[in-house]
Image (cartoon, rainbow, N blue to C red):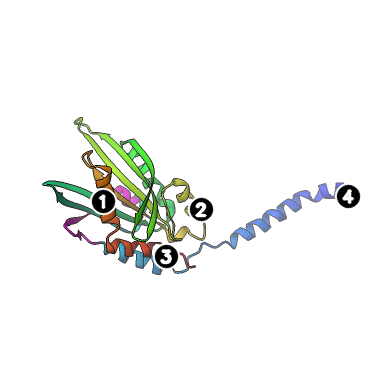
Amino acid sequence: MIGVLKQFAPVLVTLAMLVGLAGFARLNIATEGVDDFMARSRKAIDELPIKIGTWEGKRMPLEAEARDLLRPNAENRIYFTWEENFIRYGATYSVIQAADSRFMTGHAPMNCYPNNGYSTTKQLDRAWKVGEFDIKGTEYGFRLVKANNQVEVINVRNFFIFPDGHFGATLKELDEAASNYRKLKYGVVQVQVVTAGEGLSEQQRDEIFKNLVGSKRSIEMIRILRSGIPK
């Protein structure tokens, strides 16, 4: 009996592999409602306001390299300025939706900024309460020494919005979304608030984040971006 089993072992292994492959073939990438979700997302991102209270904004083009990398379904970068105690401040609010979550990894801050010459001076897990949302994200500090020996210092608050409704900030979460055939085609959204210089306090940065991410239109946009995958 053992000899017979040994004789047919290669055949049994082959059959098992074929059954496994057949099962995998049935795991079709989910695309239900993707086109409609992408259209709603694009409209919501495009409609972010360029004026919030006394804050005046102007739209900034996405760099060609980032566009080639992300192949975005939608993107909006707005540079806001405002005056406080006769001092003028600025902050960039950026929202980018990659139609395929596999494209976002290279643009995540822990990869993007160091690849462009910045050194990382701070990386902290953060949780922000904005509207009805508890947002899990990461705050970064980056420093760049330019060719003329001038130093650029920036603060980046970053989080991702996944179409199943959760917030995240890690490469592991991006990889999990990219490898999940039920989530892959619904994409992922990166949100960043970037401020420059060392003159702002943590409280001021908190207020900037709250004002930009927490504006009425921004909250409405977040609700849409969290609702991609059918329940």
Q: Secondary structure at mark 2?
A: helix
Residue for badge 1: 207
Are the two marked residues, 2 and 1, in contact with CB atoms closer than 8 angstroms? no
Sooner in the amino-acid sequence: mark 3 or mark 1: 1
> Residue flagged by tag 4: what amino acid is it?
Met
Question: What mark, if any, has residue 1 been given in the picture?
Answer: 4
In the rendered structure, does residue 7 fall within the stretch colored magenta? no
Q: Is residue 92 left or right of residue 129?
A: left
- Residue at the location (37% across, 64% down)? 223
Question: What mark, if any, has residue 179 been given in the picture?
Answer: 2
Q: Secondary structure at mark 4?
A: loop
Residue for badge 3: 227
Q: Nearer the viewer, mark 1 or mark 4?
A: 1
Q: Position of residue 21 (x, y in %)?
A: 63, 57
Question: What mark, if any, has residue 68 been given in the picture?
Answer: none
Q: Position of residue 199 (x, y in %)?
A: 21, 39
Q: Height in image: 59 above or below 125?
A: below
> Residue flagged by tag 3: what amino acid is it?
Ser
Q: Is residue 186 left or right of residue 1?
A: left
Are the two marked residues, 1 and 4, in contact with CB atoms closer than 8 angstroms? no
CA gap between label 3 and label 1 equals 27 Å
Q: Nearer the viewer, mark 3 or mark 1?
A: 1
